[in-house]
Amino acid sequence: MTLPTDLDNDATALRLAMVRQIAEADADTGFPFDLAWLATARKVPRHLFVPGFYLPAGQCDADGPTLWEPVTSRLDYGRWLAASYSDTTLITQFDGEETDWDQPAARRGGAPTSSSTLPSLVLRMWSDAEVAEGHTVLEIGTGTGTGYSTALACERLGSSHVTSVEVDPARLRGAADALYGCGYTPTLARADGLYGYWPEAWFDRITAACSFRSVPPALLRQTRPGGKVLLPLSGWLYGNARVLLTVAGDGTAEGPLLPGTISFMPARTHAAPAYGNPADWAAGLHEERPRAALHAPKRLTATTEDAFHLRFLAQSAVPDAQMVTIDGVPHLVDVISGSAATLTPEGGDWSVRERGPVKLWARIERFIECYDAAGRPGPETFTLRVDGDGQWLLHPRMPRLLLSAG
């Protein structure tokens, strides 16, 4: 298929409309963007960074996985261009497998491993990191954003001030082709973001397009004193938060959790391990005596901002636990200690069975009691401190929570 000759005009009109929509939505949040980033987004052609992606077909089997349809300019020009300039995350890779975008096929299910993050979130990250002209920045996850986020930084700061690393070589090649094709020439490297990028240090700002279980020490060491590090954090319960740390001259860092319910794919080196068949874990629990659960699992699983935030905090009580729900029954699995718990509905209440050295749900219950007693404080009331003793979440009305040992 030959692309329409008025592609640039179509893209420009859609891009301006997208930025206008983002600005209007942002005006109602109370946390406005740096206007310079909105001006930058009006200049960067997102469609050049997403030549192919998947969108849900809007149908699935009764209990089956989502059907994902490939979208390219050859398959459906209008759908491709409209989606490119929608404020939507566009999935570009599943299960670490590359797609032949010349002959893409629909697929069912799979775990997304790369995407073009929705533009408003990309702008939110750059804005919240307090990036300004003259700053040198390190971005972790070039390919996670297909290079679009990197392009925004280059447009605003100049390519010489931007370094971006990516662990997936195919993702990096695709992002590099798009960036260089647009005239952007940042420093790009294949590297694990866990270790930053020493050849270009020191940086005024470091941001990540993937989440970590804890703050990688190398990133703090590569930040200038007084510089800032903006990181998404996520544990194996998939509770998420973002933190903006200011790095001191002695290597310590401290900063607040930021408001909002924003999630990112985990860094591959921090991803949860496979836990096997949940039925195998549940089988051994039938021999355990049940007890009444003090709290229903919906305190963690509800699709609300409160549950999202509580799930992040509760990970400190059971850092190695994962949760999976089968037929309405939640199971907690800890592959490190071999512990497990199952919650079963009984009438209007819940019962719990636990086995192993770590009583997983009991630990979560104790944490919820403490959280409730403190008045259910929101994320912006917590501070993360990183020093020689470890990484601690601090709150004036709660005991400090260990995110990672020193």
Image (cartoon, rainbow, N blue to C red):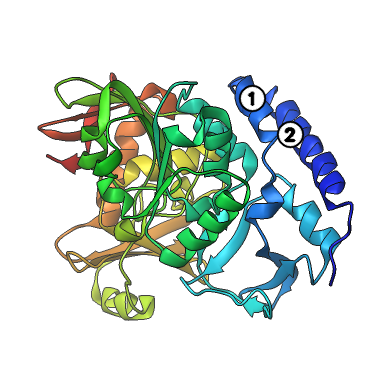
Residue positioned 74% across, 67% down in the render: 72
- For this rendering, which residue is in front, 146 or 266? 146
Image quadrant where one finds the N terminus: bottom right
Rendered image quadrant of residue 23: top right
The answer to whether 185 is drawn above or below residue 130 in the figure is below
Give residue 167's position: percent from left, percent from top: 37, 59
Lateral position of residue 139 relative to residue 122, left or right? left
Residue positioned 44% across, 53% down in the render: 297
Lateral position of residue 62 relative to residue 204, left or right? right
Give residue 45's position: percent from left, percent from top: 70, 45
Residue, disc 1: 29
Q: Is residue 348 visible?
A: no
Q: Is residue 132 visible?
A: yes
Rendered image quadrant of residue 183: top right
Lateral position of residue 67 relative to residue 369, left or right? right
Give residue 238's mark: none
- For this rendering, which residue is in front, 225 or 368? 225
Give amino acid for label 2.
Answer: Val
- For this rendering, which residue is in front, 106 or 338? 106
Give residue 351's position: percent from left, percent from top: 38, 60
Give residue 19's mark: 2
